[in-house]
Amino acid sequence: MATKRLSILLGLTTAVTVGASLPVRAATFDFDQLQNISSRPIDSDDRLSLLGEVEQNQGYTAFFNRDRSAPDGGHADISLNASGNGAPYYVTGRQGSPEDPPSGATRTSSVTDIAGFPTLSSFLSSNGISFNSLGVSLGQKSDRAFTETWNLGEDKLGQDWFASPDSTIEERIYTANPNAVEFFLSYGNTKIVDFGYSDLYSVLDYGPTTVVSDDIDLAFGDPVRVKKVAGLNPFEDALATAFLQDVDAAGGGVQLYIDDRNVSDQNIALGNGFFAINLRFVGDLRAVPVPEPTSVIALLMFGTLGAVSYVRQTKRSIQ
C-alpha cells in the first residue's frame, strides 16, 4: 500500500460486519472489481473480531528498504488518485517489526468479540476467560530474518501487483516461504493453534480524490486448515480443542480478513536499514469451509469413472 495508507496487509481485510466492538463500515467493497486476484473473502457466522492497536504495542508493520532503488524498496503507486508515496515491500506482525530498538510486542492482535463459535464461547465463559486473552498473530518466525516475511517477490507490475493510471484500484499479492513464516492463535503468549500458510492479498481503492479519508484498504488470505500445537498443557489443549471443534463444524478452515478505513501513517519507525510504518490491525478471523484441492477432486472423479468402467466391462463378460 502507499506509505500514506500502508495498511497493505495482507492483502488483509473485508467488507462485512464483524464484532460490535469494531468501527462501523460506511460501505462494502465490490470484489467483482478485482481483475487479477481470484480468491475472495467468505462470509461466516463464526467470527473472532480482531483489533491490534499500535498504542497497545500491537498491530502490524509495513516496511521497505530505506534505499528506494533497492530490489526491496517497494514500487510507485500509479493508480488513479493514489498519493504517489510508494508501496511497501514487506509486511509482518508488530512482534516481527524491524524497528530499532525493538518494540517488545508479543502479538499482532487481540480478540475483542466472538460471533458464533459456541464451543469456544462456552469454554471461555465457564472458565472465566476474557476474549482478549486470545490473540491472532502472523509474521516471520522468531529465528528468521526480517526479509523472510511476506513480501512482493520480484515486485513486478502484472505479476506481483496490478494497477493502472485509469483505475483507482490496486491489487497486491504478498508471498513467503511457508517454512519461514507463521500464522496462529495464541492464549496469552502461548501459540495453541497453527493456521498453516496462505498468500496475503492486498486491495486498495484510492477513492474519488487523493485524500486518504475516502480510501478503502482491504486484505485477506485463502482459507487454510488448522491444527493444534503439540506439547500444550491440559488447559491449553482443552482450549485449542474447543476452538477446533467449532472450526470443524464450519467446514474445517479459517480465513483472515482485514478492513481499516481510518488508516494513520503517523507511527514511523527506523531500524536495520528499513523504513517502517506501524499500523493497527482490525478485522476478523472466520471459520469457513476449505475447498478440496483440484488434484484431490480429479482423483475422486478418476476413481468414480474407473469404477463405472469396471462395472460395464464386468457386465459384458458375464453376458
Image: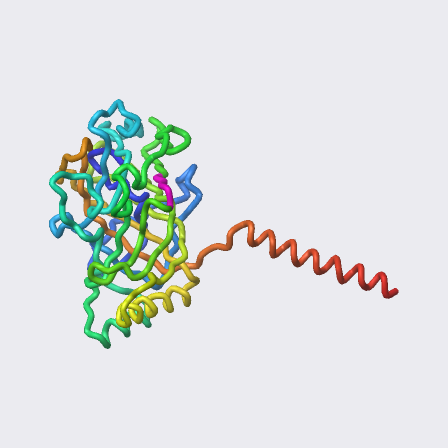
Nearer the observer, 15 or 279: 279
For residue 155, side relative to residue 319 (left or right): left
Query: Outermost residue, right direction?
Result: 319
Question: Which quadrant would the C terminus be assigned to in this image?
Answer: bottom right
Residue 85 visible in the displayed image: yes
Residue 189 image position (x, y, % from top left):
21, 59
Nearer the observer, 290 or 217: 290
Residue 201 image position (x, y, % from top left):
35, 42
- Image quarter for residue 123? bottom left
Residue drawn at x 41%, y 67% is 249
Nearer the observer, 37 or 226: 226
Q: Is residue 206 above or below residue 181?
A: above
- Image quarter for residue 81? top left
Magenta: predominant secondary structure element? loop
Query: Outermost residue, top direction?
Result: 69
For residue 246, side relative to residue 216 (left or right): right
Q: Answer whether residue 203 is magenta in the image.
A: no
Q: Is residue 252 above or below residue 263?
A: below
Question: Which quadrant would the N terminus be assigned to in this image?
Answer: top left
Residue 177 image position (x, y, % from top left):
37, 42
Residue 222 image position (x, y, % from top left):
40, 49
Q: How many marks?
A: 0
Residue 216 visible in the displayed image: no
Q: What span is colored magenta in the figure?
A: 174-178
Nearer the observer, 12 or 210: 12
Residue drawn at x 31%, y 30% is 79
For residue 38, side relative to residue 257 (left or right): right
